[in-house]
Image (cartoon, grey):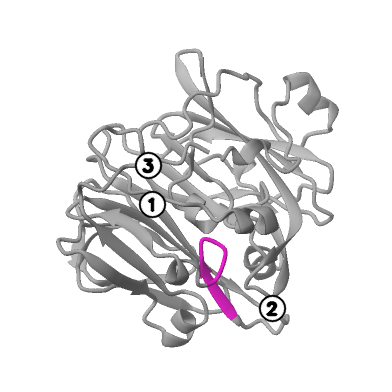
Amino acid sequence: MDNLRRGGVFSRWSRRQILQTGLVGLGTGAIATYAWRKKNSLAQAEVKIPPVTFDQDSITRNGFDPMQILRDFDYGEVSEEKGQRVREFHLEANSSTIYLNAALEYVSWNINQRVPGPTLRATAGDRVRIIFHNADGHSHTLHFHGTHPDTMDGVKPVRHGQTTIYEFDATPYGVHLYHCHIAPVTRHIGKGLFGLFIIDPPEPRPPADEMVLVLGGYDINDDEKNELYAFNGIPNVFRDRPIPIMQNQLVRLYVLNMIEFDPAITFHIHANFFQLYRTGMAMTPHEASDVVTMGTAERHILEFAYPFLGKYMFHPHQDYIAEHGCMGFFEVIPAGAQISIDKD
């Protein structure tokens, strides 16, 4: 689903239009053919993607389905300027009501009408241009982890109705993130203003079924404690709707912990071990394990394959967190199963 153009989110802005809004920031304009969406991930001929069904009720009520977020990578609008590849992304902050379960409504602060925000993806050395518009009633920013000048650090407030441009070279390669940096940061992150930012190495990693799991917490009564937790925005989705994966096929998980108020969590898979690439900043694994500990904003790449069919749990090993929304299953299906990629 094209998250950048759904639900009233602005689409393309010319340089003149951006300047007319009173932007806060720097950047040059170049709008090019939108052709890199999902390229280099699921389109790899070597990778077979299991049949996936999206929950239309969740899309109608919440604007997104966590199952979509699993394999939804945004490669931006691609152009070339002075011999350098440029990837331009359009992000908008807003507020929307989501259902955390059948009865509980929650007012989220979000990017492009989803929690977490879009998973942005570039290759090391690309020029990244993020056009950020704040349509919410509160001031917000986007602070990117990685390397960039201080003018692009995303700590200066962007007020309601304003637009700014963050522009920098994508470096170093690894698994990074972005989030709002307005105080109290715990509240802005806890309400949903965060997302993954993946910078691929110059030489691609081996083909794999690539997926995103972002852990978040919900303080639903403003007591600075989380009452509910979730993978990809909605509690218990992958408990009730297991993630299908192919038998003996390499899975590459991009895992990010964005749970505030809890100092650290663990992530554990059942009946298997994974190769761990800490912060995704290496081409060879740092270690093998079946559990990893992560503080807030910590993220890693986990690679594994399941040799046996069946359903296998994954969850934090803090039982309260697992039992209050962060519980899921991988359903391993035969490698010969019919392939059906949802093309939005």
Residue identified by numbered label 3? 340
The one nearer the camera, 11 or 194, is 11
Q: Secondary structure at mark 3?
A: loop
Tag 3 and tag 2, C-beta contact below 8 Å: no
Q: What is the number of the mark on residue 220?
A: 2
Alpha carbon separation for disc pair 1 and 2: 28 Å
Tag 1 and tag 2, C-beta contact below 8 Å: no
The one nearer the camera, 105 or 161, is 105
Q: Is residue 166 above or below residue 328?
A: above
Quadrant of the image occupied by residue 92: top right
Give the percent coordinates (x, y) of residue 37: 48, 32
Q: Residue at x 44, y 77 (%)?
A: 264
Q: Residues within 10 Å of mark 2 (few under 14, many from 20)?
A: some
Quadrant of the image occupied by residue 21: top right
Q: Is residue 37 visible?
A: yes
Residue identified by numbered label 1? 211
Q: Amino acid at mark 1?
A: Met
Q: Amino acid at mark 3?
A: Ser
Closer to viewer: mark 3 or mark 2: 3
If you read the primary sequence from the N terminus, does the residue marked by circle 3 or circle 2 appear first? 2
